[in-house]
Amino acid sequence: MLLRPVIVLAALLLASASQAEPAPRCELQALGSLPVRLAGPALLPVVDGRLNGRSAPMLLSTGTSDTGLLRAPLEKSGLAMRASFVKALSGDEQRPVYMASVDEFAVGPARAIKGKLLVYDEGDAQLPFVAVVGRDFLYQNNVEFHLAAHQLNFFAAQHCEQAFMGYWDDKASVLSMADETGGPRHAQIEVQLNGETLRAVVMSSEPYSMLSERAAARLGLADSASDGPRKTKPINQLRIGDELIAGVRLRVGPLVYYGKPEEAPELWLGLDFLRQHRVLMAVSQRAVYISHLGGPAFANSEDDWRELVRREARAGNPDAQALLR
C-alpha cells in the first residue's frame, strides 16, 4: 500500500527536474583592447594609458606587484611626492618609500580615481614610459596578451567558472594558477622541465625567459656547458600544459622574489615566450590559457632577436629602426 505514493512522488520529481531551468551559459564579454608597441632599446611592451586626463606611455609588467610612477617624469610634471619610511627587507635599516597622489589613472577598462601610487626611482635610465602597470591593475579583469598582433585584450566573465575560455583556440592549454599563501601574488603555474615540476610565472617586462639558479642546480644543469655570456643551458624537454618543447636552451640567473622562499618562481616566461604564444590570464577562473603560434617557443637566440628587430623596423617601429643604425 505504501509503494504507490512513492512511485507518484518519484514521477513528480522527474517531471520537475525535466522542467528545471538550464544552467546559465558562460558569457565572455570584451571590455576593450589596447594596442601594444615594443619600445626602447629592449623593445618592452608599452601601452598608452591615462594619467590625470592625459595620455601617458606605460610599461606592462606582470612581474611588478604594485603599479607606480617613475620619479623623473613625475618631478617634471609637478606632481607632489610624499615620503614614508619602512623597514628594509633585510636588517633594521629604514628606507624611504615615496607615494604620489593622482586624480586619475587608467589602463583600458581598469581605472582609479583620486588614489595614491608608488614612485619608482629609475636613476639615470632614459625609459620610454612614465608609469609601470603591475599585477594589481592588470589583473582586475581577465587579460589576454596577444603580442604577435600587438594587442592587449580585457574581458569580463559571467557564469564561466567551469567553462573553457580559450575562445581563439579550442586546443589551447589550460593551467591552474597555484595557490600562494604569502607575499605578492604572481599567478604561478606548474610546468615540467626534464621531468621535474617547477613553478613558472609570466613576466611581460623581462626580455628573455629565465631559469632560476637554484632550479638549475637541482636539475643538474649547473655544471652543463653554457654558451658564453648569455649563460643558456640545454633543456631536453619542457612541458607547458599540452605543449611539449624539446631541444631548447634557457638562460639561467637569479630570479628576484620577495615572498616565501618555498613559493618562489623557478622559471620566468618572458617576452620571448609571449611573442610566440597567445596567453589569457583568466583571473576569474584562476587559470591560464596558452597556445603556441608557431616558430621557436623561446625566441631567445641572437638570430631571433635580430629577426624581431628587423620585423619591427619594417612595420615602422622607430625604436627598432634606431637599433639597426
Image (cartoon, rainbow, N blue to C red):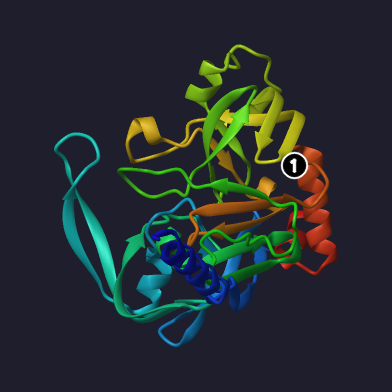
Residue 50 showing in the rendered view: yes
- Counting from the top left corner in percent of width and height, residue 163 is at 59, 61
- The kind of residue on which mark 1 rests is Ala
The correct choice, above or below, for 211 with respect to 294 in the image is above
Q: Is residue 268 left or right of residue 1?
A: right
Query: For mark 1, does the 10 Å Cα neighbourhood hold few (<14), some (14 to 19), or many (20 or more) residues?
Result: some
Query: Residue at image x 39%, y 75%?
Result: 76
- Counting from the top left corner in percent of width and height, residue 305 is at 76, 46
Question: Where, quadrant-wise, is the C terminus in this rendering?
Answer: bottom right
- Counting from the top left corner in percent of width and height, residue 318 is at 73, 67
* Nearest to the observer: residue 176 or residue 314: 176
Dividing the picture into quarters, in which one does residue 140 lie?
A: bottom left
Query: Residue at image x 50%, y 32%?
Result: 266
- Residue placed under numbered mark 1 in the picture: 297
Query: Residue at image x 61%, y 46%?
Result: 270
Residue 129 showing in the rendered view: no
Could you say whether the residue bearing mark 1 is in a helix, strand or loop?
A: loop
Q: Is residue 246 left or right of residue 162?
A: right
Q: Is residue 142 left or right of residue 260?
A: right
Most extreme residue toward the bottom is 53
